[in-house]
Amino acid sequence: MEVETMCRHNLPITIIVINNNGIGGGVSELREGKAPPPSVMLPGARYEKVIDASGGRGYFVDQPDQLLPALTAANEGDGPAIVNIAIDPRATRKPQQFDWHTGRT
């Protein structure tokens, strides 16, 4: 509903979704006959479509060369936008000097 409110008031907000197909490790495909873990969203969920339904602008990115044009269009257009960036479900975190940089303790 926050997205609908952003659209109704034409707020200049860009939401960035880093989409690994779910919370934690995510899954890359559903296995026939097996339910996915409850923390996993459907593979390939198109979060940018949520804002399309409310009159905003949605962008989907699944290739590195699509990122800059999508971010530019989202930030230069009128009103709210969502940029849904699909990443590898098995992507690991970049090593950090301090554990608190990654949220791990």
Image (cartoon, rainbow, N blue to C red):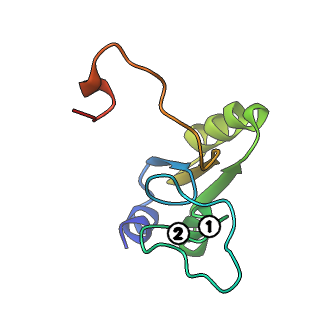
User: Marks 2/1: CA distance?
Assistant: 7 Å
Image side of residue 20 versus residue 59, left or right? left
In this view of the protein, which residue sits in the foreground, 16 or 57? 16
Q: Which residue is mark 1?
A: 45
Q: Which residue is mark 2?
A: 41
Q: Residue visible at 49% across and 67% down?
A: 40
Image side of residue 22 versus residue 39, left or right? right
Image location of residue 36, percent across then percent down: 54, 75
In this view of the protein, which residue sits in the foreground, 11 or 40? 40
Residue 10 to residue 70: above or below: below
Q: Quadrant of the N terminus?
A: bottom left
Mark 1: few/some/many CA within 10 Å (<14, 14-19, 20+):
some
Q: Residue visible at 68% across and 41% down?
A: 70
Q: Quadrant of the C terminus?
A: top left
Image side of residue 8 versus residue 55, left or right? left
Residue farthest along the top direction in this orientation: 97
Identify residue type, mark 2: Met
Q: Secondary structure at mark 2?
A: loop
Q: Residue visible at 56% across and 62% down?
A: 56
CB-based contact (under 8 Å), mark 2 and mark 1: yes
